[in-house]
Image (cartoon, coloured by chain):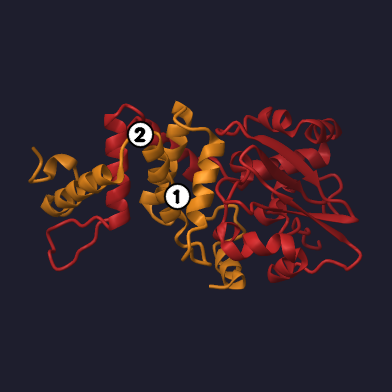
Chain colours: A orange, B red
Amino acid sequence: MSLRELITHSQGLGDGIDAPVFAEPWQAEAFALVLALHEQGLFTWDEWALALSSALKQPGALDDASDYYHCWVAALESLIAIKNVTNSADIDHVTAAWQRAAHATPHGQPILLENDPERS
Amino acid sequence: MSHDHDHPHDNELDPMAARVRALETILTEKGLVDPKAIDAIVETYETKIGPRNGAKVVAKAWVDPEFNAWLRRDATAAIASLSYTGRQGEHMQAVFNTPETHNLVVCTLCSCYPWSVLGLPPVWYKSPPYRSRAVIDPRGVLAEFDLILPDTMNIRVWDSTAELRYLIIPLRPEGTEGWSEEQLAELVTRDSMIGTGLARVPEAA
């Protein structure tokens, strides 16, 4: 999408005063995780801005910024890895557990990690 | 977030939703975040923080000379006096449009934005074309917003950082003498506080 198309799309959402903030719930959660970790003092906001900037600069970043929160999550993962909180293998592992839990949860019920059939 | 595939009774998490849940699980188990705090942050940004805050700051600056002077001197404190405070400890600077100079805000580095007064940025603000072109060709970028400024008007571009965020104070529209702060705030659009627009002109009576 060109800048013009992005603007037109944004104007279709009104004058911005009441525009939706997040496109999907996970974006809101990822956003809040970063704010919470910063408040905990895990990193400075400067460190965060650099991590995000570096994720946004990766080749293949999309012109329409629709991958913005993907970059946000990538930046969060890289920063907590640098801080020795966790690593991508651990994150992969827990992600898979959540996906198994989702499959095992009857539709309409809340998805809980306890529902993962392989949970030990 | 969940949707049916060929297993009508199963839930499905899309890959990003599952990954963010995993991050929250790990960070919670390590005692670094509290899920209740996460929910509270989401709710605040979805419902309480947005450009209406900024519009109130602008309207107050238009009608209250003392607040106006304070905003010019120390925007962080003046804005905090209305209880709009940043979570990142960032400093605010108010930049006033004049009949001679129009101001425009960008973050070329990433997407730094004055969240406490404008909420979260629109998609175009975060997009590579806006971030790269605003500095090189501000007039061309403004034209994309249908904002054509006279050639005689200067355009000044302000590049935000993690520590310093800018709020543009647009010119008060003519024909609004005697208006209340509440009425004036209705004329202030989000884009006018980023500099990609102007305050609305009141409809002719």
Q: In the depicted view, which residue is nearer to us: B205 or A47?
A: A47
Label 2: element kind: loop
Q: Chain of mark 2?
A: A
Mark 2–mark 1 distance (CA, rounded to whole Å): 18 Å
Asked whether, in this view, residue B40 is left or right of residue A12, the answer is left
In the rendered image, is residue A110 in sight? no
- In the displayed structure, does residue B22 sit left or right of residue A40? left
Which amino acid type is marked by label 1? Trp
The residue drawn where x is 62% and y is 72% is A4
| A26 with respect to A35 (left or right) | left
Q: Residue at x 14, y 57 (%)?
A: B10
Amino acid carrying label 2: it is Asn
The image shows residue B32, relative to residue A67, as above or below, that is above
Q: Do the CB atoms of the residues marked 2 and 1 lie less than 8 Å apart?
A: no
Question: Badge 1 is on which residue?
Answer: A72
Q: Position of residue B106 (x, y in %)?
A: 67, 54
- Quarter of the image where one finds residue B3: bottom left
Q: Which residue is rendered at x = 64% and y = 51% of the image?
A: B107
Q: B192 and B180: which one is in front?
A: B192
Judged left or right of residue B102, residue B24 is left
**Mark sitting on residue B29:** none
Of badges 2 and 1, nearer the viewer stands 2
In the picture of the structure, the residue carrying the numbered disc 2 is: A84
Q: Do marks 2 and 1 share a chain?
A: yes
Locate residue B71, reporting x and y percent.
78, 34
Mark 1: which secondary structure?
A: helix
Subunit that carries the residue with mark 1: A
**Which quarter of the figure is the C terminus of chain A placed in?**
top left
- Residue B37 at x, y percent in the picture: 39, 31
Res. B117 image quadrant: top right
Circle 2 crowding by C-alpha within 10 Å: few under 14, some 14–19, many from 20: few
- The quadrant where residue A110 appears: top left
